[in-house]
Amino acid sequence: MKELWERAKAIFLSTLRSDEEKSQAARYFSMITSVCVENGVFQILTLNSFAADFLKTEYAERLKTCLDLAGGDKSLSLAFRCSPSAQPPIILPPSPAAATAPSRSVNTFISTMPLNDDYTFDEFVEGPSNSYAYAAAKGVAEHPGEIGFNPLFIHGGTGLGKTHLMQAIGNEMRRIKPTLSVCYLTTETFLNEYVNSLQKGRAAITEFQNKYRKIDVLLVDDVQFLQKGKQFQEEFFNTFNALKDAHKQIVMTSDVAPKNLSVLEERLISRFEGGMVQEIESPSYETRLAILQKKAEGITPVIPDYAIRFIADRIKSHVRAMEGALAKIKIAMLLNPGVSLTNEMMTRALKDLIEKEHNIKKLTIREIQEAVARKYGVTIEQILSPERTQSLVTPRQLAMYISRKYSSKSLQEISEPFGKTHATVLHGVKSITKRLDVEEELRETLHQILNEFGINPDETVN
Ligand code: ADP
Ligand code: MG
């Protein structure tokens, strides 16, 4: 019962978009003292009658849907009442299992690319930075194709667990619904297959189209690569629509939010935003510790706690970098058997990774240009070209801005690799500075690019 409620709550929370809504819901949920089922009514008991009223008028309808989604008996009605010290007996509802019984009996699990067995929900450490994405992914695994979760779009910086969560959906489905056809693939693979089929002719194209339109759950990783081609976008759009219309589940990941997939057509972006969009952010200290502890399990020699805290203190932006840090500490221990690691030894072992976190002044102009071009789906040549369309001016000026702030180069030194005058660079930097004050989207893009370099702009002193 409690589990059903916890699941319903997680689903409900994952449907909220704004921070304001989330914190309001969290506040009212914290006033729930207990839940129970009595006479076919799912009762939610609260600390005071104000909370009961609020929950009823604001959330009742949506909560009922979430209870259904979480596997609750659909005939249950929902009631709210004040009961500050409620400890009612827990009465279980009839099992909902029959409702989700697989409709086909043969194992049709397919995947274009193999799933990593370690990428499961159990191995994923949940924390405030990823809890909404996590809950949404679980919701999808349990109820693929349900309205509200389709498509699920997970975005966030590199190495923060997008692929892990997406494959966890695949692994979970293989476990609990082996009869569904689930397909995981990266956007690049999709693109390559498409291009191959184009070269082979009509029959191959039809085969390609049929293949992806017959799938029950399509997991497409890194859709930012859709920005690579117009015709490919069109093909993806068609596959997307065919699956969506047939109530098949689609999950996508990207390193930017849908609205920042700037090269994509508006209709594609709005379709992507039509289900649920969740972001994964950089993990907090506590989450970093928990992740490191989990990843350190089973490593020999045993990584001591102080070393884990040492890493959590210093490697903040990427989980992947944290894994790298553990491996480096392990090597340092193997090289110094019987010696307890000192801070100095660990600093030496993690030198590169720590530098990447902190010594941001080492970014080269080329690295910056590449990262910005990648983010905007344009080429470096376009960034360096004299063309003045807005879709090029923004990335060009943003690259100038980042170079100015994070490369420790003078305006003169920056202007050269951009092939522009000192005054043009200055103008670009100023223009971005002004726009950052008012344009949240641009701020987010900047954050994401800096994130790739392991830079947290909030901690940066200029
Ligand atoms: P992304 O696709 O966002 O670039 P990945 O999913 O490839 O990132 O994650 C990079 C590595 O970090 C993987 O090995 C993954 O298992 C690990 N990882 C990321 N987030 C978590 C988490 N919350 N709990 C456990 N492992 C995580
Ligand atoms: Mg990935």
Image: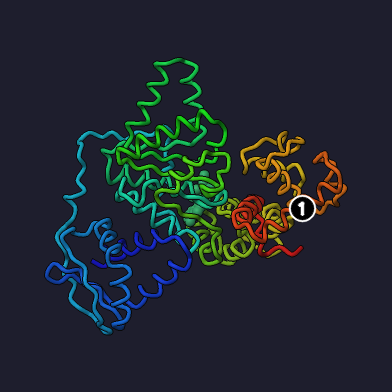
Q: Quadrant of residue 40?
A: bottom left
Seen in the picture, residue 233 relative to 272 is either above or below; the reply is above
Seen in the picture, residue 387 relative to 99 is either above or below; the reply is above
Q: Residue at x 75, y 35 (%)?
A: 385
Residue wearing tag 1: 429
- Is 77 on the left or on the right of 418, as rendered? left
Element at label 1: helix
Amino acid tagged 1: Val
Q: Give the position of the N terminus as an image quadrant.
A: bottom left
Judge by depth and name the residue closer to the eye, 104 or 285. 104
Judge by depth and name the residue closer to the eye, 73 or 353. 73
Q: Position of residue 391 (x, y in %)?
A: 65, 41
- Is 114 on the left or on the right of 406, as rendered? left
Q: Quadrant of residue 90?
A: bottom left
- Is 393 on the left or on the right of 121, as rendered? right
Q: Residue at x 77, y 50 (%)?
A: 428
Residue 333: tell me if it is visible.
Answer: no
According to the image, what is the colour scheme of the structure? rainbow
Q: Position of residue 332 (x, y in %)?
A: 64, 54
- Other-residue count near label 1 (Cα within 10 Å), few / some / many at <14 / 14–19 / ≥20: many
